Image: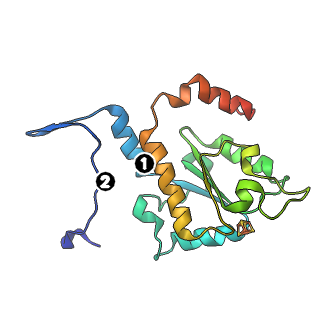
Amino acid sequence: MSDTNNNTNFAEAPEGYTGAGFFATSLEKIVGLARKNSLWPLPFATSCCGIEFMATMGSTYDLSRFGSERMSFSPRQADVLMVMGTIAKKMGPVVKQVYEQMAEPRWVIAVGACATTGGIFDTYSVLQGIDRIVPVDVYVPGCPPRPEQILEGVLRVQDLAENESLRRRNSPEYQALLASYNIK
Ligand code: SF4
């Protein structure tokens, strides 16, 4: 809707102090607000779940309502790695390389049963969940998940982005998490 109808939605201001002609809050909250509403997804789609993602991007579900209409097929300009579909073990190193090329802060969503656990493919050739090679922030269940579920996953990442401490990525806990995946 255009703003001529006064239907434009604005992001809610973070907690702070307001008065005549001023608003004051913390830098962390402002950065969180900006990050939350400008997440750029990198769709790593290998099979059927990717089709659901296409529907999520379409006009009915319209992921752009949440500031994420800008798909990034370059890891260096992406915030959220969305892995959708069956990941063969041979494909695992490629997923990891894409993750490593993303700048911090970065988040990961495992979309669907295959990306989460290998799904129905309990076989020698299929990775039994992408969290064996990269840390995952949000899991979206389903085979396939509906677009509403994928949207919910993005909203949960928005929550993480909004509330994340600016220092988290430098914390010993986060460095230990990356080290446990052999990621520098
Ligand atoms: S979870 Fe189901 S729909 Fe998604 S990629 Fe696997 S088999 Fe396909």
Where residue 20 sits, quadrant-wise, is top left
Is residue 72 left or right of 165 when viewed as pictured?
Answer: right
Closer to us: 127 or 64: 127
Q: Amino acid at mark 1?
A: Lys
Q: Quadrant of ligand 1?
A: bottom right
Residue 184 visible in the picture? no
Q: Would you place residue 183 above or below residue 7 in this image? A: above
Residue 11 is marked as 2
- Mark 2 is surrounded, within 10 Å at the Cα level, by few (under 14), some (14 to 19) or many (20 or more) other residues, namely few
Q: Residue furthest top?
A: 172
Rendered residue at 67%/68% (across/down): 49
- Mark 1 is surrounded, within 10 Å at the Cα level, by few (under 14), some (14 to 19) or many (20 or more) other residues, namely many
State if disc 2 and disc 1 touch (CB < 8 Å).
Answer: yes
Secondary structure of residue under mark 2: loop
Which quadrant of the rendered structure holds the N terminus? bottom left
Give the image's coloring scheme.
rainbow
Mark 1 and mark 2 lie on one chain; the one further toward the N terminus is: 2
Q: Which residue is mark 1?
A: 36
Rendered residue at 43%/52% (across/down): 38
Residue 160 is marked as none
Is residue 128 left or right of 24 when viewed as pictured?
Answer: right
Q: Amino acid at mark 2?
A: Ala
